[in-house]
Amino acid sequence: MTWPAAVLLGAVLVSVSACNQRQAAAPVPQAPPEVGVVTVAPQPIPYVRDLPGRVAPMRIAEVRSRVSGLVVKRLFEQGSTVKEGDVLYKIDPAPYEVDLMSAEATLANKEAALVLANQQAERLETLLARNTASQAQYDTAFAGKRQAEAEVAGAKAARDRAKLNLSWTDVRAPISGRIGRALLTEGTLIEQGSTGVLATIQQLDPIYVDITQSVGELNKLRRDLASGELSKLENDTANVHLIMDDGELYPLAGRLLFSDVTADPSTGQVTLRVLIPNPNDELFPGMYVRARIKQGIDSDAIAVPQQAIQRTADGKPEVWVVKEGNKVALQPVEVGPVVGQNWLIRDGLKAGERIVVDGFQKISAGIEVKPVDHTAAHESEAGKPHDPDEAESEGKRQAASQVR
């Protein structure tokens, strides 16, 4: 090959090589990033509030003696369950037995006097008819009869009072429930007119929980119910669950009975009373709980997963929305309370909009994305069967690749 031809061939090869390098350096168009989205749809969501509360007995009774005397026996175990009418204390009955016998003797005396008065009145009535007795004599006999009848009635009342006093020497439980510690022991003298408490009984099943809510919240709730923004719950609905100190939910639900008509002037709180079953005595009077109360239902609420909510530098909430052409943009929203795993959206979203819930690190405002249904993707992933043999084979392939 001659020298000019060699030079020409070298120039051609250099030109082809440069062209190939330019083609290799040209950027390859990238596919739009894939993001998980959910479509906004209205759904019925209960209006739920967590409020502080205190447990209170449904009924409480202080056991007191109606008569004076010496306590001779205590007939209950402290902390046990008693039934209405059970004898709790025994007061020395001897003085009251004597009083009853005296009252019965007095009654017998008065009844005998009444028999005599009746006979006298009947006799004078016969004599008066024969004109052998005067009207004055008959009137005196008739008045004596009426007086004897009144004395018999008084004696019967005194006897009944003595019977009552004797029966009250058995101090009985006024209600059924759990009785506390004994406040008097055997040998204690109860004086006349004493107001001392012998024991206290509390009915604990069912039991009350008194919770508090601000007047402002309660009035807003009532306005929302009146306007139809919230739907009312059905009557007798079990709409309250308790959260215990350890964070666990109490297994039985209760229902709201009423709200108080007076607000606490120092706190601006209103008391709401809840009735809740307590068959195993897990709830004690005075203990602190939190009540999760359902006060209404928002029939067309909009809620989004918590991870969809982004925050601006000043803490305002916003979401990524997939617009026309699958381009994303940030959109401010107004959020309400957290319901389950979702944020309740008060304003800023409408039904049918698609919001991003996964893949935020891949996107920026205005770029085109490939939206994938987040719910369907998760269900598909969760539904894949787990094959141990396939997993083992995959592990071997990865190990071999690492060795190579």
Image (cartoon, rainbow, N blue to C red):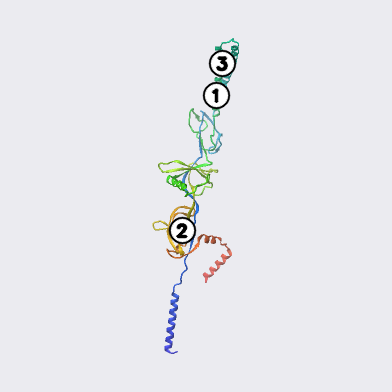
Residue 287 image label = none
* Position of residue 237 measured from the top left corner of the image (x, y, whole percent): 53, 46
Residue that protrudes farthest toward the front in the picture: 227
Q: Mark 2 Cα within 10 Å, few/some/many (few <14, many 20+)?
A: many
* Kind of element beneath mark 3: helix
- The amino acid sitting under disc 1 is Ala
**Badge 3 vs badge 1, beta-carbon distance below 8 Å:** no
Name which of mark 2 and mark 1 comes first in the sequence: 1
Farthest residue in the left direction?
Answer: 314
**Foreground disc of the pair 3, 1:** 3
Disc sitting over residue 157 in the figure: 1
Kindly report the distance in space between the C-alpha atoms of the residues bearing marks 2 and 1.
Answer: 82 Å
The circle on residue 308 is 2
* Image marks 2 and 1: residues in contact by CB distance under 8 Å: no
Q: Quadrant of the N terminus?
A: bottom left
Image point (43%, 87%), residue name: 6
Q: Earlier in the sequence, mark 3 or mark 1?
A: 3
Residue 23 in percent (x, y) is at 45, 76
| Residue at 57 percent of width and 65 percent of height | 390
Please give the name of the residue rendered at 55% of the width and 14% of the height, measured from the top-left corner: 139
Q: Which residue is mark 3?
A: 142
Q: Residue 334 falls in which quadrant of the image? A: bottom left
Q: Say which label, 2 or 3, has the lower sequence index.
A: 3
